[in-house]
C-alpha cells in the first residue's frame, strides 16, 4: 500500500479518529516522534495532550517547554496506571476543547508493567477505535519495539488502523476493526485454589459482604483508605451482579504477593453488553452506569470478562497505592 | 388551608414516593419569605439507614449505610427535604457507607435546587469526598462541603 493511501485510511476521511501506533527503536526516535507530532498539531492550532510515565514525562516537558499552555502533560503512571481510565480522561480533554481537533500522544508502558496490565492496554487501544469513531482526534501511541514482549506487541498493533515503523506510515492489514476481538479479550488466569470464596444471592447480603471483605482484606496490609476503595469498588460489582446478573454470584479474594496487590473478583450470570461500560462518566442525571466507572477510578487494574452468559470483573489494588485515583489536571476554565 | 399537604410522613416503603410535611414552594406564597415556617420532616428508617430531622437550619442527621437496598428511598428523602427550604444541612458524621448511586443522589438533588439554594454536607466521610472529587460532582454550585 502506498503512503498516500495509508494516510487517507488513517484519517477515515477528514473529520474522524486517526489512530496510529509508532514503534520506535531508540530514545532519540521516541523524542523526535513526539516532538514532530506535537509541533504538527501546534502549527495548525490543535491542542495536544502528552501522556508518559514519570521521568519520561519530565524529559518531554523540558524538551517541549517552549510550547507553553498549548500542551497538556499527564503522568501516565497516574491516570493511565489502570488503562481503563484513559478513555474517560481523553474524553474530558476533547470536551474541554469543543469544536477543535485535538492530538493525543505518548507512552503507556514502563518497566514493571504486568502481563495483565499489558493485556488491558491492548483492550484500551482496541476500544479507542470504538469510543472515538467519528470524533476529531488524532492519537499516536508509542511503543518500544525492543522492550515490549513481541507477542503482546503484535496484539497491540492489531488494535491500530495505522502503523508507523522506521518513519514509514502504512495502513495495518492486520487491524481488527473497532471494539473488542478475541486477541484483546483473552481469558483471565484462574484464581488461586486457596482464595477466599463467598457467594451472595440477595440485596440484603450486601452489608455482610462489605463487612467480610473489609475484615479479610485488612489482614492483607491495605491501608485504611485503600481498604475503603476496595470495599466501595467491590460493593459496586456485587450490586451490578445483583441488578444485572439475576441476583446471585460469587466473590473471590486473594493477595498476589508477587504482584504486590490485593485482588478481588465478582462473577455472576449475565453479560456486559456495552463494551465501553465504565469508560464514560455518565451525567449525574443518568440512572445507573456509574458503578463500573467508579471501579475503574478506584482500582489499579480492572479486568472485565464476559464469556457466554457469565461475567467476571477482577480488580487489583496495589498494596503501595494511594487512595483514590489520579485524574487529569483540572480543566482550565475558558 | 394555607399549605397543600401532600403525604404525611416518609414511607419506609422504598417503592412509594416519599411523603412531605408542608407544601411545594409554588403552592404557598409565604413560604419563600419564611423559610423556617415549613420544615421538612425527614424521618426515615430501615434496617441499614436512619434519618432524623434537624431544625434551623432544616435538614437531616444520617446514620448507617446507603446501598442498593435503599438508594431509592434515600433519593426520595433528599428530594423531599430539598423541596422544602432554601438551605438544607445533612450531617453525615454517622454515615457508615455510601455507594455511587447514593452519592449521585446527593449531586442530583443539589443540581436540582434553585440558584442560590444550598445543600450543605457536614462531616462527609473521606470516601464520599473522593467520589465527589473523581466524578466532578463536587463542583455542583449548590453543593457545599464542610469537612468532617
Image (cartoon, coloured by chain):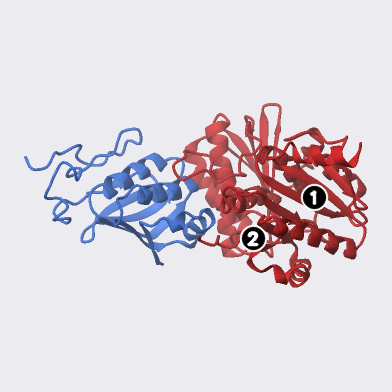
Chain colours: A red, B blue
The local secondary structure at tag 1 comes to: helix
Above or below A295: residue A9 = above
User: Dot 2 falls on which chain?
Assistant: A
Q: Earlier in the sequence, mark 1 or mark 2?
A: 1
Name, please, the residue furthest toward the left: B1
Q: Pinpoint residue A265: horizontal percent, then vertical percent.
A: 67, 44
User: Dot 1 falls on which chain?
Assistant: A
Residue at the image point whose x is 60% and y is 60% from the top: A226
**Are marks 1 and 2 in one subunit?**
yes
Q: Pinpoint residue A89: horizontal percent, then vertical percent.
A: 62, 52
Q: Nearer the viewer, residue A314 or B122?
A: B122
Residue at the image point whose x is 71% and y is 26% from the top: A308
Q: Nearer the viewer, residue A43 or A217?
A: A43
**Label annotation for residue A44:** none
Residue assigned mark 2 = A219
Q: Pinpoint residue B64: horizontal percent, then vertical percent.
A: 40, 52
* Crowd class of label 2 (few under 14; some 14 to 19; many from 20; radius 10 Å): few
**Label annotation for residue A118:** 1
Which of the 4 image quarters holds residue A50? Answer: bottom right
Q: Nearer the viewer, residue A81 or A88?
A: A88
Residue at the image point whose x is 33% and y is 42% from the top: B76
Which of the 4 image quarters holds residue A236? Answer: top right
Rounded to the nearest whole Å, what is the CA distance between mark 1 and mark 2? 29 Å
Residue at the image point whose x is 86% and y is 45% from the top: A163
Mark 1 or mark 2: which is in front? 1
The local secondary structure at tag 2 comes to: loop
Q: Pinpoint residue B87: horizontal percent, then vertical percent.
A: 27, 57
Amino acid at each position: 500500500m502506498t503512503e498516500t493511501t495509508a494516510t487517507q485510511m488513517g484519517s477515515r476521511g477528514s473529520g474522524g479518529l486517526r489512530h496510529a501506533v509508532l514503534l520506535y527503536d531508540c530514545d532519540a526516535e521516541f523524542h523526535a516522534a513526539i516532538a514532530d507530532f506535537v509541533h504538527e498539531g501546534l502549527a495548525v492550532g490543535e491542542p495536544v495532550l502528552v501522556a508518559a510515565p514519570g521521568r519520561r514525562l519530565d524529559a518531554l516537558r523540558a524538551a517541549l517547554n517552549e510550547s507553553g499552555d498549548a500542551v497538556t502533560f499527564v503522568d501516565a503512571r497516574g491516570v493511565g496506571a489502570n488503562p481503563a481510565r484513559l478513555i474517560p480522561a481523553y474524553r474530558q480533554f476533547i470536551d474541554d476543547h469543543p469544536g477543535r481537533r485535538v492530538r493525543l500522544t505518548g507512552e503507556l508502558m514502563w518497566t514493571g508493567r504486568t502481563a495483565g496490565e499489558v493485556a488491558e492496554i491492548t483492550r484500551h487501544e482496541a476500544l479507542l477505535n470504538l469510543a472515538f469513531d467519528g470524533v476529531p482526534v488524532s492519537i499516536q501511541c508509542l511503543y518500544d519495539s525492543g522492550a515490549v514482549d513481541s507477542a503482546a506487541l503484535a496484539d497491540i498493533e492489531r488494535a491500530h488502523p495505522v502503523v508507523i515503523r522506521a518513519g514509514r506510515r502504512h495502513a495495518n492489514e492486520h487491524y481488527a476493526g473497532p471494539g473488542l476481538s478475541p486477541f484483546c479479550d483473552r481469558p483471565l488466569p484462574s484464581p488461586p485454589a486457596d482464595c477466599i470464596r463467598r457467594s451472595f444471592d440477595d440485596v440484603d447480603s450486601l452489608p455482610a459482604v462489605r463487612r467480610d471483605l473489609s475484615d479479610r482484606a485488612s489482614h492483607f496490609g491495605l491501608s485504611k483508605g485503600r481498604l475503603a476503595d476496595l470495599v466501595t469498588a467491590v460493593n459496586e460489582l456485587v450490586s451490578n451482579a445483583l441488578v444485572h446478573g439475576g441476583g446471585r454470584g460469587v466473590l473471590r479474594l486473594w493477595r498476589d504477593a508477587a504482584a504486590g496487590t490485593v485482588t478481588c473478583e465478582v462473577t455472576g450470570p449475565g453479560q456486559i453488553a456495552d463494551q465501553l461500560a465504565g469508560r464514560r462518566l455518565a451525567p449525574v442525571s443518568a440512572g445507573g452506569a456509574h458503578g463500573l466507572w467508579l471501579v475503574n477510578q478506584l482500582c489499579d487494574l480492572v479486568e472485565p470478562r464476559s464469556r457466554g452468559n457469565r461475567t467476571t470483573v477482577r480488580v487489583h489494588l496495589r498494596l503501595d497505592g494511594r487512595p483514590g485515583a489520579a485524574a487529569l489536571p483540572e480543566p482550565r476554565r475558558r | 388551608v394555607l399549605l397543600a399537604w401532600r403525604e404525611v410522613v416518609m414511607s419506609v416503603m422504598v417503592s412509594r414516593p416519599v411523603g412531605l410535611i408542608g407544601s411545594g414552594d409554588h403552592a404557598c406564597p409565604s413560604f419563600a419569605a419564611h423559610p423556617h415556617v415549613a420544615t421538612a420532616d425527614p424521618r426515615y428508617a430501615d434496617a441499614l439507614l436512619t434519618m432524623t430531622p434537624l431544625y434551623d437550619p432544616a435538614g437531616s442527621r444520617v446514620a448507617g449505610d446507603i446501598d442498593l437496598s435503599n438508594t431509592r428511598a434515600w433519593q426520595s428523602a433528599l428530594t423531599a427535604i430539598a423541596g422544602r427550604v432554601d438551605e438544607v444541612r445533612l450531617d453525615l458524621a454517622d454515615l457508615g457507607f455510601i455507594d455511587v448511586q447514593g452519592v449521585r443522589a446527593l449531586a442530583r438533588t443539589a443540581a436540582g435546587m434553585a440558584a442560590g439554594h444550598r445543600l450543605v454536607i457536614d462531616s462527609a466521610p473521606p470516601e464520599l469526598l473522593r467520589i465527589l472529587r473523581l466524578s466532578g460532582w463536587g463542583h455542583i454550585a449548590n453543593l457545599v462541603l464542610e469537612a468532617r
